[in-house]
Amino acid sequence: MIKAILLDFNGVVINDEPVQMRAYTEVLKADGIELTEDDYFSSLGMDDRTFVVAAFERAGKKVDEARVSEIVAEKSAKWKEMVTSEMPLFDGIKDFVEKMAVEFELGIVSMARRHEIEYVLETCGMRHHFSTIVSSDDVVKCKPDPECFRIGFRQIDRIRTDQGHLPMTHKECLVIEDSPPGVVAARNADLPVLGVTNTVSADALRNAGASAVAEIHAIGCLHRSGAYLYRSCCDVELYILTRRSRRSDQLWLNILFRGMPPKATFWPPPLTSARA
C-alpha cells in the first residue's frame, strides 16, 4: 500500500524544461558557449553547478568556481523572470496535488535550487501540500545518484512517524519522475517509480527502470468529471472515481505495480464524459 509520494519538480510539477534551456542558452552565450537541445536533454538530472561545468567541458573550456556561481545566479534570475510572466504548470497538476495530499504524505525531490522550488509552490498556492523538499542545496551528488531519494525517504518517513504512524517500507513510498537519471536514482534508492512522459519517451523511462509509465497530463482533462484515467502509453488502463472512498486511490497505486497487462480496465468503469 502506497503511503507517501515523492515528486520530481522540473518536468513533473512545472513544465519548465524549455524555460530552463532558454535561460541557460542566453546566459552561456556570454562565455561563447552554444547550448543545443541535445546538450540540454543529455544533462537531465544534473544540478545547476554540475550542468554549467559540463557545458564548459563540452566546449573544451575551463571555468572557475566564481564564474560558475555567477552563471547559476544569472540563469536563476532569467528563469524567474520567464516563469513569473507566465507560470508553466502542467495542466491538472494543482488538482492532482490537492487530491493526493488528502490521501498521502507528499514531498519534492529535485535537483532544482530550493528557492526556485519554493517560489513556484508559494506563488501557485501548493507549498502547504508538501511536507518535505529535497533540493540540490541538500545533496552532494546529483541524480542518477540515489542520495537525494534516500534523504527524501528518510525525511518523509520521519514526518509520518512523528504523526504517530508506523515506519514505512521502501515499497510504500512512490516516486514520480520524468527523466531517466531520476528513475535510476529512485530505483537505486529501492523505491518504486511511476514514469511520466512529459519530457522523454515511455520506452526511455521503462529502459531506465520505471515500474510503470503514465501520462500525468491526462489528470487535468478528467478532474472536473470526477475521474482519473491513465491510458494511451500507460502500462495499465485504469479508471478511478475521485468521489469514491479513500480505498480507490490506494487501489490505483497498488494495482499499478502488479505487472498487469496493458489495456486492463478495473472497477469502477469509466464515466461517459471521460476522455484520454
Image (cartoon, rainbow, N blue to C red):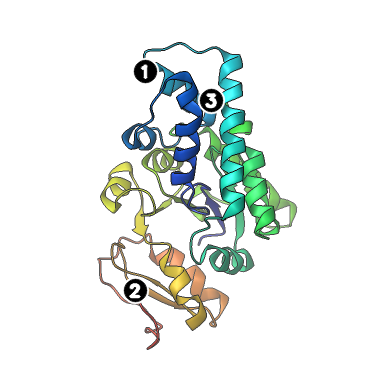
**Marks 2 and 3: CB-CB under 8 Å?**
no
The front one of 105 and 166 is 105
Which residue is located at x 38 percent, y 27 percent? 34
Q: Position of residue 216 (x, y in %)?
A: 43, 62
**Marks 1 and 2: CB-CB under 8 Å?**
no
Which residue is located at x 47 percent, y 26 percent? 28
Q: Amino acid at mark 3?
A: Arg
Q: Which residue is mark 3?
A: 49
Residue 276: mark in rendering: 2
Which residue is located at x 39 percent, y 81 percent? 274
Characterize the local packing of mark 1: few (<14), some (14-19) or many (20 or more) Cα atoms within 10 angstroms: few
**Marks 3 and 1: CB-CB under 8 Å?**
no
Q: Position of residue 1 (x, y in %)?
A: 50, 62
Q: Quadrant of the C terminus?
A: bottom left
The front one of 194 and 157 is 194
Disc 2 versus disc 3: distance between alpha carbons?
A: 39 Å
Q: Which residue is mark 1?
A: 59
Q: Earlier in the sequence, mark 2 or mark 3?
A: 3
Q: Is residue 66 above or below residue 269?
A: above
Q: Secondary structure at mark 2?
A: loop
Q: Secondary structure at mark 1?
A: loop
Is 259 left or right of 188, judged from the image as shown? left
Looking at the image, the residue that sits furthest to the bottom is 272
Picture mark count: 3
Is 251 left or right of 159, judged from the image as shown? left
Characterize the local packing of mark 2: few (<14), some (14-19) or many (20 or more) Cα atoms within 10 angstroms: some
Q: Earlier in the sequence, mark 1 or mark 2?
A: 1
Q: Earlier in the sequence, mark 3 or mark 1?
A: 3
Disc 1 versus disc 2: distance between alpha carbons?
A: 43 Å
